[in-house]
Amino acid sequence: MKVKPQILLLILIFSFTLWGCNPSPTTQADPQQQLAQTNECLNCDFSNAEFSGQDLSNVKLNQSKLNNAKLENVNLTGAFLDSVDFSGADLKGANLSQAGLSAANLSNADLSGANLTNAYL
């Protein structure tokens, strides 16, 4: 008896499913790893993250959560930060010059000494 290749393929896929061996698992990348690799992470959750002193110039973080994040002396020059939640974030001494901050939530954020020159608010 000759087995058709399509039937053999269906049997293999069914077997993998039964044994919990997904041949192509879908895993969500770590947001910080994604940011480091691509310089962008849209709609990501960085709540309570530590970024102090880092160079994040020109990053794209639109619609992300950075509430209560530590961003002291971070360089966010030219960053795309539209609709980002910075509530309660520590942005002391941060460089936000030329950053796009349209609809960003900065409530209770500490912006002491931050540079907002030519930032779009």
Image (cartoon, rainbow, N blue to C red):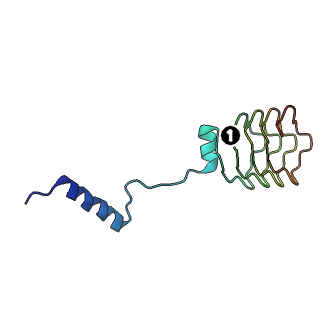
Q: Residue furthest bottom?
A: 18
Q: Is residue 104 left or right of residue 34?
A: right
Quarter of the rendering occupied by the C terminus: top right
Residue at image position (59%, 51%) is: 30
* x, y percent for residue 40: 64, 41
Q: Is residue 50 left or right of residue 107?
A: left
* x, y percent for residue 111: 89, 45
Q: Residue furthest right?
A: 112
Q: Is residue 53 above or below residue 5?
A: above
Q: How many marks?
A: 1
Q: Which residue is mark 1?
A: 60
Residue at image position (26%, 59%) is: 10
* x, y percent for residue 107: 86, 53
Classify mark 1: residues with Cα within 10 Å, few (<14), some (14-19) or many (20+): many
Q: Quadrant of residue 61?
A: top right
Quarter of the rendering occupied by the N terminus: bottom left
Q: Residue furthest front?
A: 103
Kind of residue indicated by mark 1: Lys
Judging from the image, what secondary structure is the residue with disc 1 in? loop
Q: Is residue 20 above or below residue 32?
A: below
Q: Is residue 38 left or right of residue 57?
A: left
Which of the pair 44/49 is nearer the observer?
A: 44
Residue at image position (22%, 54%) is: 6
Which of the pair 7/35 is nearer the observer?
A: 7
Q: Is residue 4 above or below residue 56?
A: below
